[in-house]
Image (cartoon, grey):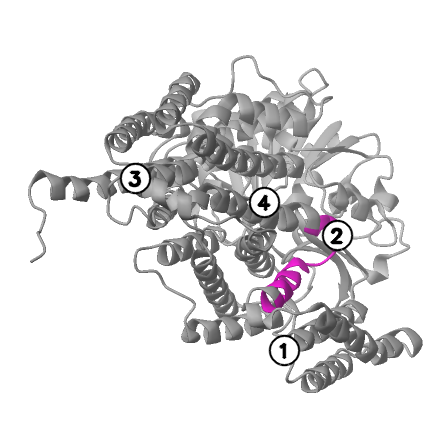
Amino acid sequence: MQRVETGPVSTARFIVPVLFTVTIFISASLLFFVQPLFAKIVLPQIGGAPAVWTTAMLFFQSVLIGGYLYAHLVTRYLPVWAQLFLHLLLWGAALFFLPLAIPEGWQFAAERSAVVQTLVLFALGVGLPFGVLSANAPLIQSWYARSDGPSADDPYFLYGASNLGSLIALLGFPLVAEPLLGARRIGELWALGFVTFGAFLLICGLLVLRGPNARAARAEGAAGPITAGQVGWWLLLSFVPSSMMLAVTTKISTDLGAVPLVWVVPLSLYLLSFVLTFAKRPIGASPVLRLLYLIALGGLGAAFAGLTGGHLDVWGAAGLVLAFFVVALFGHARLYAERPDGRHLTVFYLVMSVGGALGGIFNSILAPILFNTLAEGGVTVLLAAVLILSRAMRPTRALALKGAALGLIAVVPIVVMTRVYGVDDWLTLRLTMFALAGGVAIWFRHQLPAAAISMGIVTGISLYEMPSGDVFRDRSFFGTHRVMEADGMRQYVNGTTIHGSEKLADFGRDRPEPQLYYHRNAPMARVLGSPVGQRAKRVGIVGLGVGALACYSQPGQDWTFYEIDAAVDRIARNPAYFTFLSACAPDMTTRLGDARVVLSQEGGEAPYDILVIDAYGSDAVPMHLTTLEAMELYMGRLAPDGLLIYHISNRYYAIDRPLGRSAAALGLTARIEEYDGNADRDPGDIGSRVVMIARDEGVFGPLAADPRWRVLRSDGGPVWTDDFANLLSVLN
């Protein structure tokens, strides 16, 4: 009869996995909390320029890889007691960085590299605490493999607990912590959590030191070497879900706009897929999941190729997210199935982190440089279809060459139709593409890898050759830029938002008529055309668009635009696209960069008589431009009788609420007009919402007596500051 362990021994074996699970859970929660927390702390100082944010993400990804590399090296070359001593020493050193804050004396210098300054700021402010946390997932699992806990010979289930902690932190910061607490208070609680984590880390280390190491020694002795093929396979299996998550997020935010928390859902499902696959009872790559995976790839491929229509609707976005989740589940299930034994655990996680980071680098940094459309989604689908299925379905060199050769031959009719005969009918070209792709699929019906490569080439080249109908198309780190024509209008579209429009009939006129938010009947035009606007000497505009407001400038006025995206400035100044600037104000200055940072560095310049904050025309809210401190900065750049104007038209947010609170807190007077427009009579006359703020009621002049402008008072809610701002509270 088998003896059943009871008493202290069985209790200890139960406590060990609980303690390790809690420790790795706390570590992951702190890791995912610190990224948005520190970004919120430094945002007012560094702004929202693309170089800043891509550099910040590069910093976090690089440190994460560094943490995994550190875990691999210490577990390989140091005994457990030395690992514990070193890690606790680093944890203790990280306590001197708490609570998290901008290092004393640090200031952003416009003349120096933003990339270098951002890296230095993050390194000095959060580098060591983040680095200590980054190493814990592989390090703690390695320690558990040396304990006498259940499943010590296969500790990968702890990675599921790690990702569960990440998931809860991901949802908890924007949904709970940020709405209830300011950044300073969150930072204090985070510091308390970091101290608590140290205590659990010490307990786990002592349990390992007191436990037997025979199991680990036997596992290490039996382990075989890792091959280059395994490493490459792990890289691909981790790259595809990471890249697909970002591609889906970009696609949804482009087609539907920056819907509140749009990035949270794909990232949450990405983490959930790890929780479900890296577990004691994992979801494996079953035949059912394989079938769903193939269906999901078909749907994703169709969406990224534009075969489902020009833009997604809400249901289409939901389907896209669901398809991504299936791909993430399948990819991570295959990754879990390919995991090595305990000896190579840290190498496995190191390669995983590199693969995930490569997905981020490809989508966030390389794709905007390489493509002028959202092509990275289609590229990732092709990688997933060709390389992520099964070993038997991977293409050999011969099959790859055959597929590529037939694909290049099959696509020739499309090239001839577009380049030789000038065919531009969308339906004809799409039907031809489908026929050609179907033909190569039938030809290689028994050789799936070759069929996939051939169909990918036909589809990719065909879509590239097909005319888009746009006058101009480009892409920057801020999104896609399109100049198109519709209903007698030349329009500039960023994502799904029209940022400017000009009548085609106005091209060649001395002074074209502004349209949409800036129509003659709209409040922005009436303010700039009022006596207040006419007597202004210096005017500042934050947000260039296509430069339509320039046509309200008066002789002798000095106008300056502030624009964060250089691509927008190039579009607005090119008379082949729009003529507002070239016709009305060709000598106006554009100062590139984050407006708050640039304005804060211009304190010595002559004040503005009018300052317009026109940064809310899309679906997002730049909160660092909306806080009390930001309003104080704007008022500091205005003359005593200056006028501050906010254009706050927005699909999702009632931005007048925080503005009313800040104005009341600063003792300012504010008015708001919500203009309905008259689009039935004039398509260019659409609704808009504008707030004007001044130190004294008399600054408004005749506008104060206009009944369309009503007094904007505080609603009694909390004032938005750099420390506290609750975006969810102002949802319409």
- According to the picture, the residue beneath numbered tag 1 turns out to be 448
Q: Position of residue 514 (x, y in %)?
A: 75, 51
Q: CA distance from mark 2 to mark 4?
A: 29 Å
Q: Secondary structure at mark 4?
A: loop
Over which residues does the magenta segment extend? 367-386
312 falls in the magenta region: no
**Under tag 2, what secondary structure?**
helix
Q: Position of residue 254 (x, y in %)?
A: 60, 57
Q: Are marks 4 and 3 in contact (CB under 8 Å)?
A: no
Kindly state the secondary structure of the residue where label 3 is placed.
helix
Packing grade of label 1 (10 A; few <14, some 14-19, many >=20) is some
Q: Mark 2 belongs to which amino acid?
A: Leu
Q: Which of disc 1 and disc 2 is earlier in sequence?
A: 2
Quadrant of the drawing holding the N terminus: bottom left
**Viewed as shown, does residue 1 lie left or right of 308?**
left
Residue to which mark 4 is pinned: 616
**Residue occupied by mark 3:** 214
